[in-house]
Amino acid sequence: MIKIHPFTMIAFSSILFFMTLIYTHPLYSLSILVFIIVGTLLLGKGKEVKTTMKYGMYAAISIMIINPLVYQGGRTILFKSPRLFLIGKLKITLEALAYGGNMALKLLCIVFIFLFYAAMTDRDETFSLFSKYAHKLTLTLSMTINIIHRLKLEILRVKDVMILRGVNFKEKNLIKRMKAYYPILKVIFIASLEGSLDRAESLYSRGYGKGIRTSYSQIKMRRIDYFMNGINLTLLFLLVYSIYSNVGFVKFYPTFQGFDLTDIKFLIYIDIALFVVILLIRGCKKWKFLKYRI
Amino acid sequence: MNYGVISAGILLVSFIYVFISYERRNISVKEISLLATLSALAGVARVPFVALPNVQPTTFLVMISGYVFGPKFGFMTGAFAAFASNCFLGQGPWTPWQMLAWGLAGFSAGIFKKFFKYPSRLFFSILAFCWGFLFDYIMNLWHWLFFVYPLNLQSFIFTYINSFYFDLMHSVGNFVFAYLFGKDFINILSRFKDRISYTEIPVEKIKEE
């Protein structure tokens, strides 16, 4: 796994996130999407990409279907229905279809940015970055996540005890099965509340909140972080510049005008910056020189 | 105007405000630990029901913790439950909206208690039922603001009608959970509340003798 400072990754993903939201040009979103998927695959997260893709496609298709049905504007009419009950005449236009497709692309992009962030950083490191500034929040959150794991074990334990006492969880009758499960819920509920008191006491006895917290390890900025932050700055500059000079925007309504050449020329700069990141990821995984030097 | 971006910005700023005020509050370790436990319970409750579309006891659990421990506590429970459970089910752009929706569910239950001290089982269940719809309406609002164009009444209604059965499942689930477990769980939590806020009986007299 490549170790990158969480700050770098937060900056990088939020720039990508705003780029996806702000640009309306589908090619821009597409190139970001392709970059993220390739990057995540290079990190060896093929399985996660698959499951995210499944969910993302479901949501994307629903957007693509709803949008043309809801909006009747646009000049290029593809399909006109006869008068329908309650709804009236329905027409599907090329513009609405294209807009829906673009939005679906954006949704996929956003979902994958989150996945990419999770793949690039360690969750604990993100926590320790925030714990410097907001230690109560991070403490609560990391405790919550810890307890979720414990609860899973606890449920299995309680279930074993109940089976020993003769409760049948494989009851075919649904109501009977629910009745069998009900005590588990209650036991878990009470037991975990008791546990919370114990945890509070152990925190207190270890002197929590009495002074400045000690930390066992520090996360440091390394060469790769400086390099990535350079790319972040470049991307930010490109984003601001493109908003200023109105590049990267496409109007879908009333008529879809096709793509402008200047937009595509500008896209090349963004793609170069993103390609460098891909090379960096691959380099840190495979090339010995980069792996040990950076 | 891109309303999606604006709404995300407003949400972010208000969350930062809420979290800073949580950070500044003089909160005890017991409260932190209890908050973490209840959020974990609410979060983990989502997992076994993933197979049933939109049926989960999370909303109900967040609501009873808000009901017993007050509106602020309820909000934080909802927000943490959403964030922590998404660490396992997948973070995404929906996370802040879920945090908001569940947070508000907890918050409203806390407010509800201030007006109705001893609600009947049915009354509380009906509140839970309403929150099933409200939760999904907040989530739909996100969907509508981001991905639908133009933002007019027609597209608004269409988006909301489209998810009606989905929302109904959530509400019915909430109702059933609140009706079956509501009274019991509120009793357990109230008793627990008394337990953590106990004061020791002074023994000054024995010491003197």
Image: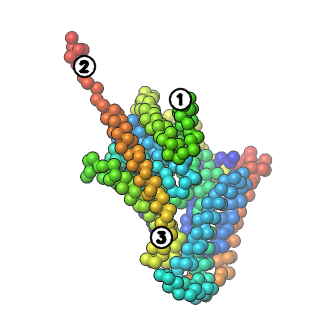
Q: Which mark is residue B203?
A: 2
How many residues crowd around disc 3 within 10 Å: few (fewer than 14), some, or many (20 or more)? few
- Image coordinates of residue A217 in percent, x first then y, are 58, 37
Amino acid type at circle 3 is: Ile
Amino acid type at circle 2 is: Val
Q: Which residue is mark 3?
A: B161
Secondary structure under badge 2?
loop
Determine the CA span between mark 2 and mark 3. 65 Å
Q: Which residue is mark 1?
A: A165
How many residues crowd around disc 2 within 10 Å: few (fewer than 14), some, or many (20 or more)? few
Q: Is residue B138 visible?
A: no
Camera-nearest residue between B126 and A59: B126
Q: Is residue A63 visible?
A: yes
The chain carrying label 2 is B
* Colour convention of the picture: rainbow
Q: Eyeballing the image, is B23 above or below B144?
A: above
Determine the CA span between mark 1 and mark 2. 44 Å
Would residue B14 appear left or right of A245 to someone viewing this image? left
- Image coordinates of residue B7 in percent, x first then y, are 45, 66
Q: Mark 3, mark 1: which one is toward the viewer?
A: 1
